[in-house]
Image (cartoon, rainbow, N blue to C red):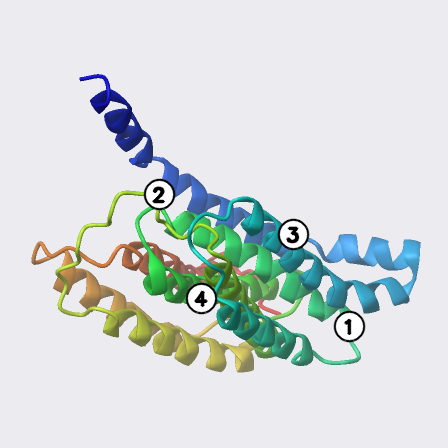
Amino acid sequence: MYKAEPIATTARRATPRPGRPLLRHLCCVLLVVVFVHLYQLYRLVDELFGPGFLLVSPLVLPLAILLLALLLARRNRGQTPFKTWVVVSGMALCLAALAVPDADIAVKRIHVAQYLLLSLAVRHALAVNTRGVELTAAGSLLGGLYGVHDELLQGLHPDRTYGLRDMLVNFLAASGGSLAWHGLGLFDGSRQPPPPAADSRLGWVAPLALAVAVTAMAVPLFACRGQAALPWWPVLPLAALLVAGTLETFGQGRRPCPPCLPLMTVAALFLLYPLAVNVLQIPFY
């Protein structure tokens, strides 16, 4: 009689509150907005400490973040051993990301530390109803989508510019972070109730198609910098994919995979950029 109540209480605590996932995803959005506006802070740091600080700190910060994550994982370590090869693979992606930016603009490497942090926030948000490899893959893709938003927002910022190379850095760092956090067992979703099984026929075809559509949108927009208006045709494949995915899943009452809704929502926000530039006459740099 007395043993049943703690079990029920634990089950109630494990059930996520309705507003919790939304709040966590909004925090991820806020992080991206903060990243876009850190440029003035970097200029101030450059004036105070000299260019040498911004040359070294982007290399040290990712290692510091990984070390803190390792200490956190060891503190909360349960019965699950660390997946060393997964952590090493994630670190290798982060090292590759550090090598992508232009060597003459060392501060660009700070994106690696930023998207290591963002990938942890994204994983925390997705872990409410996603687990395992699906959580890691979805975290990598969602972090990459946020990285594209980061660059598009910089295109609207008067002191920044839209760049494809930075997009690649963001994606590699987000993917490396997702692998590292998976290997360390951080926010693995094991404390949450098992997510309901998805019955959509698309499975992971839709997220992969989403990645292709976003890439097909991002590359042509690079040639549109400095123009008075943005063309609509780069976003049309993405819009068609979102409409088709929505009709196929929700129109027929099927249940999508748990991370599909945040992925589709973040991707749908890309449709706002041509609207902002063309209707509000915001310059795109």
* Secondary structure of residue under mark 1: helix
User: Dot 2 corresponds to which residue?
Assistant: 191
Please report whichever mark, 3 or 2, sits nearer to the chain's N-terminal start. 3
Name the amino acid, label 4.
Ser
Please report whichever mark, 2 or 4, sits nearer to the chain's N-terminal start. 4
Horizontal side of residue 27 vs 163, given as left or right: left
Q: Residues within 10 Å of mark 4 (few under 14, many from 20)?
A: many
Q: Give the image location of residue 19, x and y in percent.
A: 35, 35
The answer to which of 184 and 32 lies nearer the viewer is 184
Query: Is residue 123 at least partly visible in the picture?
Result: yes
For the residues bearing labels 3 and 2, Cβ distance under 8 angstroms: no
Q: Residues within 10 Å of mark 1 (few under 14, many from 20)?
A: some
Horizontal side of residue 146 vs 40, given as left or right: left
Please report whichever mark, 2 or 1, sits nearer to the chain's N-terminal start. 1
Of the 4 image quadrants, the one containing the C terminus is bottom right
User: Dot 3 corresponds to which residue?
Assistant: 68
**In this rendering, which labeled residue sits more in front, label 3 or label 4?**
3
Name the amino acid, label 2.
Arg
Please report whichever mark, 4 or 1, sits nearer to the chain's N-terminal start. 1
Name the amino acid, label 1.
Ala
Q: Which mark is residue 106?
A: 1
Q: Give the image location of residue 163, x and y in percent.
A: 60, 75
Q: Where, by quadrant of the figure, is residue 138 drawn?
A: bottom left
Q: Give the image location of residue 89, x and y in percent.
A: 53, 74
User: Dot 4 corresponds to which residue?
Assistant: 140
**In this rendering, which labeled residue sits more in front, label 3 or label 1?**
3
* Secondary structure of residue under mark 3: helix
Q: CA distance from mark 2 to mark 4?
A: 21 Å
The answer to which of 278 and 108 lies nearer the viewer is 108
The residue lying at 37 percent from left, 42 percent from top is 21
For the residues bearing labels 3 and 1, Cβ distance under 8 angstroms: no
Name the amino acid, label 3.
Leu
